[in-house]
Each structure stands twice: as structure tokens, then as C-alpha cells.
Image (cartoon, rainbow, N blue to C red):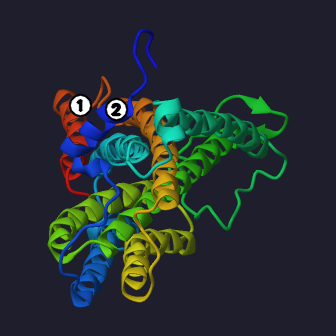
Amino acid sequence: MQAGMEPLQPPAYTAQIATRPELTCAASKGEYSVALHIVAIFAVLIASLLGTMLPLAGKYVSCLRLHPFAVAIGKCISSGVVMAVAMVHMMNHGVAGFMKDCVSSSLRQSFDALSLSLAMLAAMFMHILDVLMDFMLESWANGSTGEPPSHLVGSELPGAEAAPCGQEVLGAGCHNHGVLAAARLKNVKSIVAAIFMEFGLVLHSVFLGLSVGVAHDAETRALLVALVFHQIFEGLALGVRLADASMNFKLELLMTIIYAVSVPLGTAVGLVIVTTSNISMTGTNFITLQAALDSVCGGILLYLGFTLILNDFRADLRELAGQDAAHRGWKRLGMCVALWGGAAVMTLLGKWA
């Protein structure tokens, strides 16, 4: 809390609740149709599968294979989507969640930066994990076996097969060993990043599904339209990263299914709770847990988003729009517009989903 500022007093907080209904925990009122919510489950499932599978299809169907620059554009869009999801869809909801009237007053008034602190701690934890993973992967890549973990990595290692044999000789071997090790290291890092990205998106999606499952019909119709687009764009972002990581097909399929069923699963749970039990989805414990998880997942995705922008974006820029590339000015502009466009679209969708 800034110096000179008084803690938020109950009267002021009550006035704020009156002018901002999203800060109240009161259950929504209106007609509730089971059929509409079942339709929502399947609509969101199809949208999630469609978005995630489109970027992956090019790996297995030659006519759908994209030009490397088109893949880079997809990666730029996905980076913008991740940034917007982290800040607008998660961290913003985390901050608002801790301000709701049913949350313990000790959490609301003792430290008004609790949500952002959780996001920061999650980002710092990701940094520590990233550093430790670097040490472990470098040790593995430079080890005596030189073999990638076959249950994670597919047979294709981008860039490794085209590496020329260098002039330097280490003992009797070619310097290609170092090139292959670097390619494997980069690929496993991409896999780890994709797994963490999916973790954050899936947790967020489950709570989105819960909000649809407990909403009355009028709210569900409005949420459903936004959520279909939300899942398509998030799925595209995840699918591009899964394709870029050159994973084993079974792992790609598993991660696609897990993401695709996350919102429908949350919706189904909400539907069951509304129709068969008296469990409160607007109570103190649920709202506090949701706010904490939104904050933590927001921090994770924010770290991943900046990592993608500062590493992948610049690497693709050098490779595809470098000094010797044709139309490099237009390519650079296209990549920047794709990054900003992905962030802009997901920011707009944040108003409804």
C-alpha cells in the first residue's frame, strides 16, 4: 500500500460494491435450462478441438503444411494471446476476485496487492524452474548418451538434420555432435514451455467452464458466443506451440484432449452442482481459491509470454526477416501486427469470457 493512503474502509468498500456488481458474490437470477448448458458443453468442446488441431494437422497432412513464415505468424499471434490471457483474463480476474464481498475481510484489507504478489511469486518460481531445467537439459545434451527422451520427443528435430559437419574435430568425432545436442536442447525446452502453457490454460479453462455451468440462460447465451471464439484462439495458440515442439504424436494427442475437455468438464461440474446439490459456487472458499489460482496461473503465463516475445519472436525475426531476407521490412511488420493483433483480440474477448 502506498505511503499516505488509508486502508480501504468498509463504507467506501460498500459503496464500491454498489457501483461494481462484478465485485459481489451474489448468485445470478434467471431461468436455467439443462438443454442449453449441454449444447454449450459440445459447442465449446468442438471449438477447443478445432483450434488446437488446425496447427497440428500440417505435420501429418502434406497439403495442410504451412510455409515457415506462416508458422512464425501463428507463433506471433499465440504469443500475443498468451500475454492477453495472462493479464486480462487471469490476473485481472484474480485482483477482482480478492475484492469480492464474500472474501475474508482480512484478505481484502490487510494487503491490497495479494493477487499481484501471488502472480509475481509464480513468475519468479517459473524463472527458478527455468534455470534449473537449463542446467539439467544442458547436462543431458552434453552427456555421453546424446539420446533424447523418446517418450517426449518425436523423430524430427528442426535444424539438426541440415547442420553441416564443421571443420573442428574433437578427438575422432565431427563437431556435429554439438549441433545435434543444441538442437535437442532447444526442442526439449520447447516441450517444457508447451507443457507449462497448457497447465496455466487448463486451470483457467476449468474455472471458465464452471462459470458457464452455474450461469442462468441469458448469461450463458452471452458467454457461449465469446467462449467459442476464446477457445478457438487459445487453442490455436496452444496448437502452434505443440507443433513447434515436435512432440511424440501420443503426447500431442493427450495434451490436445486435456485442453479440449477442460471447459466442458468445468461446465458439466457446474451443471451437476446446480441441478443435484446445494453446494455454493459463490461462497468464500470457492471464490478465494478461484482468485488465487487465477493469480498464480496469470503469473505463469505472463512469464511464458515474455519468454516467447524475448526469445522465440526475436529468433524468428532474425531467421525469417534478417538482413538477407527478401521483403524483410514487410515480414517484420507482419510479425509485429500478428503479435499485437493476437493480444488485441483476446483483450476484447476478456470483456465477456
Q: Which residue is at a point 30% across and 70% down the rendered structure image?
A: 212
Residue 325, placed above or below residue 100 = above
Q: Quadrant of residue 153?
A: bottom right
x%, y% of residue 173? 78, 41
Label number found at residue 317: 2
* Quadrant in which the C terminus is drawn: bottom left
x%, y% of residue 41? 31, 80
Q: Nearer the viewer, residue 148 or 232?
A: 232
Label number found at residue 308: none
**Residue at disc 2, secondary structure:** helix
As shown in the figure, which amino acid type bears the numbered disc 2? Answer: Leu
Residue 15, placed above or below residue 93 = above
Q: Which residue is at a point 23% across and 31% down the rendered structure image?
A: 332
x%, y% of residue 192? 59, 51
Task: Judge the density around disc 2: few (<14), some (14-19), many (≥20) Cα neighbours within 10 Å.
Answer: some
Q: Mark 1 sits on what residue?
A: 332
Which is more N-terminal, label 1 or label 2?
A: 2
Q: Quadrant of residue 230?
A: bottom left
Q: Nearer the viewer, residue 55 or 108?
A: 108
Q: Which residue is at a point 46% across and 20% down the rendered structure image?
A: 1
In the image: residue 2, left or right of residue 139: left
Task: Judge the density around disc 1: few (<14), some (14-19), many (≥20) Cα neighbours within 10 Å.
Answer: some
Residue 190, placed above or below residue 16 = below
Q: Which residue is at a point 23% across and 90% down the rendered structure image?
A: 35
Callout 2 touching callout 1 (CB < 8 Å): yes
